[in-house]
Image: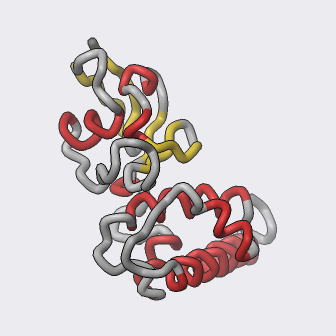
Amino acid sequence: MQIDLTVNGEARRVQCADNTLLVDLIRDDLGLTGTHVGCDTSQCGCCTVHVDGEAVKSCTMLAAQAQGTQVLTIEGLAEGDVLHPVQQAFSACHGLQCGYCTPGMIMASVQLLRRHPQPTDAQIEQGLAGNICRCTGYVNIIAAVKTAAGLIAAARSDATATHGGAR
């Protein structure tokens, strides 16, 4: 079957089998290997991407369901050489060890911060509940989310001051 979708801002047309999972289309057909396959059962969250702005576990979504959608992967999160604030915070706070869960954690964190710009610990725990890290113990991941919230708030404040409050 043919799938037409936009991935990381680029219109793509891909031929794939009817039963192809979105994660396999992203990794195998599009060559975007930052989205990881961990469990194939939606338990670990390593495969988290955004589809039309919502974080989804791409190992449980058929590629056909992504027809006509906007997909954002970890590769599309940065703007050129400038990392997204969540990526910056994960690096600065050492929110990773082996790094396998990191793309999914970052993508889930981006959505979490969109919903809760200044999240509580409970909101962070709930927002990341579907993502498993087997290395870090989560302390630095939680610190990274809080740091990212501050970076995003500071960027908004700077933009408002620069543009005289106009958006």
In which quadrant is the N terminus drawn? Answer: top left
* View extreme (top): residue: 1
- Horizontal and vertical percent for residue 89? 50, 80
Where 25 falls versus 19 (above or below)?
below
- Looking at the image, which is closer to me, 161 or 125? 125
Would residue 6 be found to the left or right of residue 38 on screen? right
- Looking at the image, which is closer to me, 78 or 20? 20
Q: How is the image coloured?
A: secondary structure
Number of numbered discs overlaid on the protein picture: 0
Q: Residue at x 34, y 49 (%)?
A: 39
In which quadrant is the C terminus drawn? Answer: bottom right
- Horizontal and vertical percent for residue 22? 35, 34
Would residue 54 be found to the left or right of residue 28 on screen? right
Where 1 falls versus 91 (above or below)?
above
- Horizontal and vertical percent for residue 151? 61, 79
| Among the 4 quarters of the image, the one containing residue 125 | bottom right
Would residue 102 be found to the left or right of residue 165 on screen? left
Where 28 falls versus 128 (above or below)?
above
* View extreme (bottom): residue: 93
Q: Residue at x 26, y 37 (%)?
A: 24
Q: Residue at x 41, y 40 (%)?
A: 58
- Horizontal and vertical percent for residue 15? 22, 19
Q: Residue at x 44, y 39 (%)?
A: 71
Would residue 126 be found to the left or right of residue 48 on screen? right
* View extreme (right): residue: 165
